[in-house]
Amino acid sequence: MATGELNPSHYPAQRAANVVKHYLNTRYGSPYRWVGLHKVHSANAEEVAESGRKYHLEISVQEMTGNTTEKCSAEVLFPALENQRSPQVQASCEALLTANTTAQEEALYQQYRRNHTLLSGHNLPDSYGHIDPDMKPLWHLGGVASSFVMLKESTENTLYNMAQVANVTQLETENDQLRFNYHVLLHDMVSQEIIHWKLLVTWSPAEGVKVLQMEELPKCEHCEVPPKPN
Amino acid sequence: YKYHPMSEITDWMDMIAKNYSDVASLVEYGKTYENRPISLLKIGPTTGVRKKAIWMDCGIHAREWISPAFCQYFVKQLLETYKTDSQIKEMMTNMDFYVTPVLNIDGYIYTWTTDRLWRKSRSPGALGCNCSCDCNGTDLNRNFNANWGTVGVSFNCCSQVYPGSKPLSESEAQAVVDFVEKRKDDILCFLTIHSYGQLLLVPYGHPSIAAPNYDELMKVGLAAAEAIKKVHGMEYTVGTSPDVLYANSGSSRDWARLTGINFSYTFELRDKGEHGFKLPEEQIQPTCEEAYSGAMHIISYVHDKTFKGTGSAAATATATLWMVLLAVGAALL
């Protein structure tokens, strides 16, 4: 793997930047704030003895729910040891999340709390890429929750995106947190595999998004989990 | 603009060959594993002489629905503009366009009936495949005889990048080879259309092998990306697969280049992961418009280089001729 100054459009910088995107979603994401990667401006990698490889990145991110882009500086450490798989990220964004989503979040939160019938949805997006406007916040929330998994699972040899929310079911609110069961499909660009995960997700405007439980599922019954690429 | 199931695409291809019979014909050139005919539309007037050609294939990977949509759009654009657009008219006079809207027909149908995210062919898994679900099929874009089975593959039959039991084990890949190999001296340009990622990939997929015309491929690719950006502002990254995506082997693009087709590109269309394979139908038109612009840049470069002598080979020939004339002129003084 290359060290030193990296070509920002080449895959090592892009994969590291993708990890930063997932990290930002876990910290700042909500049904109205889903962060995407806009561009990698510069990247640098170094071997850190006994720790792994550390990337320094200057990137721009974009809120997919809006049109603004913001600059961020970030560091990603991919650990050397096999057992300690999750990368560690530090990021500071110059004006992250200037779009004020508080009102929308509050309204959605109250609306979902008041529901007498618990919400559910499936196939977001559908085969044609369509998502019902009413379901978009739950799709965004699924994307943000998936970032918790994708952050944890990322290595220098993966590039994860959420392919679909297969299923989302609202559960009873507990401790003022809205709760949802999610079944999401993640796509790893490098292996081209589709990986299924079940998530127990909580959200409130005050506490943000949290994933209480996550479990990888086999593609079908009696199957093992998918093979890793060479 | 909508996504169309295979039956509608087949009907449309028949309709095109019928309604534009002076410039379009349907050519069946192979069969899928499930014995469906693989056909392309040959676009271009018969001129009585042997013509050069452009190859475009779509739908190698079943779930990349925007890809067949683009091939259909491309054909539609040619047929709607060739009478009035003098550049298109000239290109079609000099070159035929061979467009395969869906190569992996079995897989495409499977994404409509059973699993929207299927990628591979639908041939059965090799003996010893133990799991019943994903272990059928071969990744057609790892099955070509181009450094086959070396990088970017997994020999686990359940893998999405399983390259097959051997090169060209898949009838769909064999069909392409059978058709293109016979015409390799005539085919100037080989474009293979995929999604997602917004990339223009140049040969080769193997990190240690460089195409002899890498510089020119990059120059033309970067200009094509500029053309794409002018349409709707979308950025497409240009480079070899090992640089900008991942190493791979056995791709149709690499096979075409190795066979001697100097201009061979993979297009990875929209988006960058937000919707991924499930690109919304509202984005079909803008995606096709920008991809058309990019493809046309490459095609017209190759056309002009061949027919108008704007390439350096022609310029060198012209310069040499002048030198000779001047020398002769000087000698006569």
Image (tube, coloured by chain):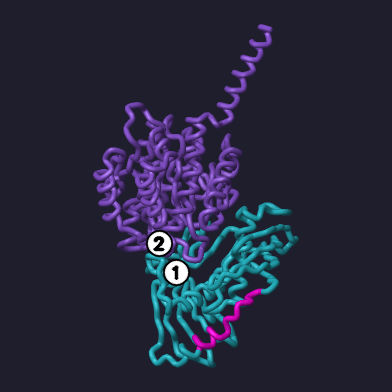
Chain colours: A cyan, B purple
Residue A230 appears at what percent x and percent y? 54, 53
What element does badge 1 sit on? Answer: strand
What element does badge 2 sit on? Answer: loop
Residue B133 appears at what percent x and percent y? 36, 62
Q: Nearer the viewer, residue A168 or B54?
A: B54
Q: In this picture, which residue range is highlighted in magenta?
A: A96-109
Q: Quote the CA–CA distance across marks 2 and 1.
A: 10 Å
Query: Which quadrant holds residue B18?
Result: top left
Image quadrant in which the N terminus of chain B is located: bottom left
Query: Is B242 displayed left or right of B164 in the figure?
Result: right
Image quadrant in which the C terminus of chain B is located: top right
Discs 2 and 1 share one subunit? no
Query: Is A142 displayed left or right of B74 in the figure?
Result: right
Query: Is A164 displayed left or right of B212 in the figure?
Result: left
Q: Is any part of residue B152 visible from this angle? A: yes
- Say above or below: B120 vs A129: above
Chain that bears disc 2: B
The residue indicated by pointer 1 is A164
The residue positioned 42% from the left and 37% from the top of the image is B91
The residue positioned 62% from the left and 72% from the top of the image is A24
Chain that bears disc 1: A
Query: Which quadrant holds residue B107?
Result: bottom left
- What residue type is disc 1 on? Gln
Q: Is any part of residue B169 visible from this angle? A: no
| Residue lying furthest right | A49
- What residue type is disc 2 on? Leu
Residue B174 appears at what percent x and percent y? 36, 40
The residue positioned 44% from the left and 69% from the top of the image is A164
The residue indicated by pointer 2 is B117
